[in-house]
Amino acid sequence: MVAALLSWATLPTFADARDGFFGPTNIFAPDSTPAHSIFRLSIFELEVEGAIFVVVFSLLAYAITKFRQRKNDDDSEPPQVYGSNQMELAWTVLPVLIVVVLFLTTAQVIHRVQDARRPPGTIEVTVVAHQFWWEFRYPQYGFVASNELHVPLSAPQLPTPTFLALQSADVDHSFWVPRLAGKTDLIPNHPNTMWIDPQETGLFLGQCSQYCGVQHAKMLQRVYVQSREEFNKWVHAQQQPAASDPAVASGSALFITKACFACHTVRGTIAAGIVGPDLTHLMSRDTIGSGAVPLTPENLRQWVHNPASFKPGSLMPAPDITEQELDQITAYLLTLR
Amino acid sequence: MASESIALRVHKSPLHVVYECVATADHKKIGLMYIVYALLFLVVMGIEAILMRIQLSHANATFLSPEVFNRLFTLHGTTGVFFVAMPILFGFGNYLVPLMIGARDMAFPRLNAFSFWMTAFGGFFLYASFFAGGGLSQAGSAPDVGWFAYAPLTSPTFSPGHSTDYWTLSLLLAGVGSIGAAVNFIATILCMRCPGMTLSRMPLLAWMNLVMGGLILVTISPLTAAQLMLMADRYIGGHFFDTAAGGSVVMWMHFFWIFGHPEVYVLIIPCFGFVSEIVPVFSRKAMFGYPAMVAASVSIGFVSLGVWAHHMFTVGMPSYGNAFFVLTTMVVAVPTGIKIFNWLATIWGGKIRFATPMLFCIGFLFQFLIAGLTGIMLATAPFDWQLSASYFVVAHFHYVIVGGILFTIFAGFYYWYPKITGRMLNETLGKWHFWIFLIGFHLTFDFMHIPGLLGMPRRVYTYEAGRGWETWNMISSIGAIFQAAGILIFVYNMIVSYFHGALAGNDPWDAWTLEWATTSPPPDYNFAGVPAVRSRRPLWDIKHPDDPDWKYE
């Protein structure tokens, strides 16, 4: 019954759940094998526990209604019962059996998800978490992207899952995109892995779920699942060095003289900082500040002017520049497609 | 006799009361100080909770800055565990255990006072960080690393200044106090029982405090060790949690949770004791399956020492490691189930009196059932990969701590207040307190599970609109208002009843354990003569000489 209720409430209506009542990060709307395995296990468990709940709840409710002291009671004490070994045995053995069943089912799912092997065609991405943004390295393709993860669709007949090697550059973080998989932490000097094989194209949301400091709340995640062709196109575009437009030369010079390059990389220029997100293809992204605000020219200008206005606690300092310089840097950034 | 001692109480000058508090080594006065101290911090943490609920009631709120919000949840958690729940239970234990086992005081009265003052100092020290944490150059700042303070967020790199040191030192101090209290409970319960009170005739509340004491000895030690390691890392170049120098931040997690999980049982096991005293009296029946209850509690204590890494299913343990901790954690469900069934069987066939203490215990039974079931969901590692560190977890442990622990503590207040003060708490206000708090509790914490299922992580100071979280958060925030109202009624009831409550007499509930054999409040020496018992319910034997318990036990 629980399964029916939940799948009615979630699966068909909100498979494409961006605007659904239950939102885009519902764990009961899985779209990838690990999330599916967890979903099925959780439904089984909810059914078992639902049955336990109904039985014990009814017994308790019955007892407190049936055995209440009546108005016309003679105030004598009820018969004293001190215990019963048979009953103790019964309510020990039954839970033991339930625990055995639940444990075996669980162990199976743990093994299936955690010990999965990589099929040929696996996409490898190294995820490096930073306060408070995400770095995605694609070693097979030789480029680095930031904050918005792109992965290809994994078709059942030809699975191309994405394996994520999880690392942290500073403190503990956690990778959690509920519709694709459970969360796994990113811990300094403690590499972890997880995998996803999304079955549908679209945008999947999530966010850091291990407290990592002031702006833990706005360390958002966006996973773009694309068809293989779209993904290849995206990879090809990302592999190119940054566009170089002489019209914004003053902005690109300021990028260096105002020390932006100390933290940011723009491939094809001398900017090779690794503290902040790679900006080579900044304008290919939909958001800035790891999902904090949509990437529009106005927001970008405001972000460069004072990142804290969108994301207080962001480690990017507000640069000491004039309004005119701000316009020039923004104009330059807008050309990084 | 009762009214006489109340009269004596009223005439003391305030200065005299202060002097008595500072100088006393009497278990009852120390118990009361623990309780008053904890209630003070309960109000403080409640205010912190309300502020956070206002901030979370709608999306993109700007009521609090992220810095302030992070301090609030750190202090709310640390205060709740170390300076509300533990002291309040130590307080009740201190007051009740000697009375229930027919002793005149705790085994080590001076250690008892020392333990209280250490704990008390720890709490005040934590809050001193508000004024001193930032050092001279800043206005002060409280700890903001979360109540389990995962490394390396606590390293000098990420947490400069002294706020984290205040956190560390306050837990060290409180830890010393807790260990002192635990030693005292164990020694008292093992060595100070009155003639005839064998371990198998001891009230369950005393048994539960014995288990709690044992757990504290085992679990506070790693916490203290971890705090010392953290201090060494921060000040004398230790590298325990410094990954750049080969340290391990996962080690902090192990140290913290080998303390942190049994800590839950440190808190709830004494509450099991409250329920096991109150439910029989108000059902008018002997505790069903006393030996099974003792065995279940002791085994919960032991098993709880082997479950800690279920807090770490997402940190990347190997699959067999995860499976091991799934099994150990699920095993806890068995003795826990035994306890629920025995309470149910105690009610069964009784004549239930719905006085306020019993109402809170019945609330506990239902809520603890739900908290146990959500606990099994979290024990299921794969399910936990989704639920861990989400609002589902927050809802789950508040179900345990508020729905389980706080409800039984309220039951304990209504039940033993007459013994402690000599006057009854007002029953009408008590029922208002119960129902309003019950409504608030369910509004807040039932609905708090849902945003967790919908992907909302804990410890976020705000969230964007359109994630499907707003409605549930708004309902949770509204519930907080009801809870606050309930607490206000409770505090009002305690103050008014202290002066105007009906006189209690020695034994207002027609109960069966030894504390009801002496006056209310009890004299300094507790009992005029050392009592002797022949069964688990000595007062039943006296009230029913024709049908005493000792014939059957």
Image (cartoon, rainbow, N blue to C red):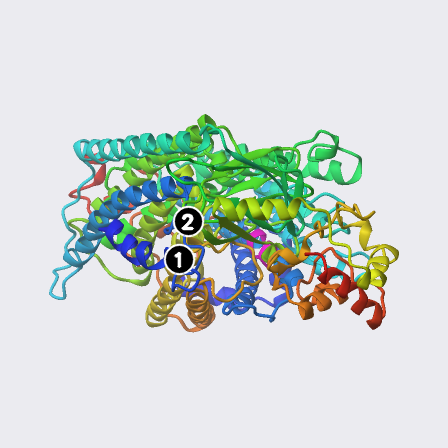
State the extent of the magenta-drawn residues as a range: B72-78
Q: Is residue B75 magenta?
A: yes
- Quadrant housing residue B448: bottom left
Q: Is residue B465 above or below residue B331?
A: below
Q: Is residue A49 magenta?
A: no
Q: Which mark is residue B292?
A: none
Q: Nearer the viewer, residue B388 or B508?
A: B388
Q: Which mark is residue A16?
A: 1
The answer to whether dots 2 and 1 both sit on one chain is: yes
Taking B268 as reference, is B38 left or right? right
Q: Nearer the viewer, residue B437 or A220?
A: A220
Main secondary structure found in the magenta portion: helix
Provide residue B54's location: percent of width, then percent of height.
53, 69
Residue B221 visible from this viewpoint: no
Q: Which residue is mark 2?
A: A200
Q: Chain of mark 1?
A: A
Q: Nearer the viewer, residue B212 or B427?
A: B212
Residue reaching furthest to the right:
A257
- Which circle's residue, 2 or 1, is located before the other in the chain? 1
Residue reaching furthest to the top:
B320
Q: Is residue A81 above or below residue A112?
A: below
Seen at 61% across and 64% down, the residue is: A293
Provide residue B367's location: percent of width, then percent of height.
33, 53
User: What SS does tag 2 mark?
Assistant: loop
User: What SS does tag 1 mark?
Assistant: loop
Seen at 30% across and 60% down, the residue is: B359
Seen at 50% across and 65% down, the residue is: B8
- In this view, the mark in front (2 or 1): 2
Q: State yes or no: discs 2 and 1 in contact (Cβ < 8 Å).
A: yes
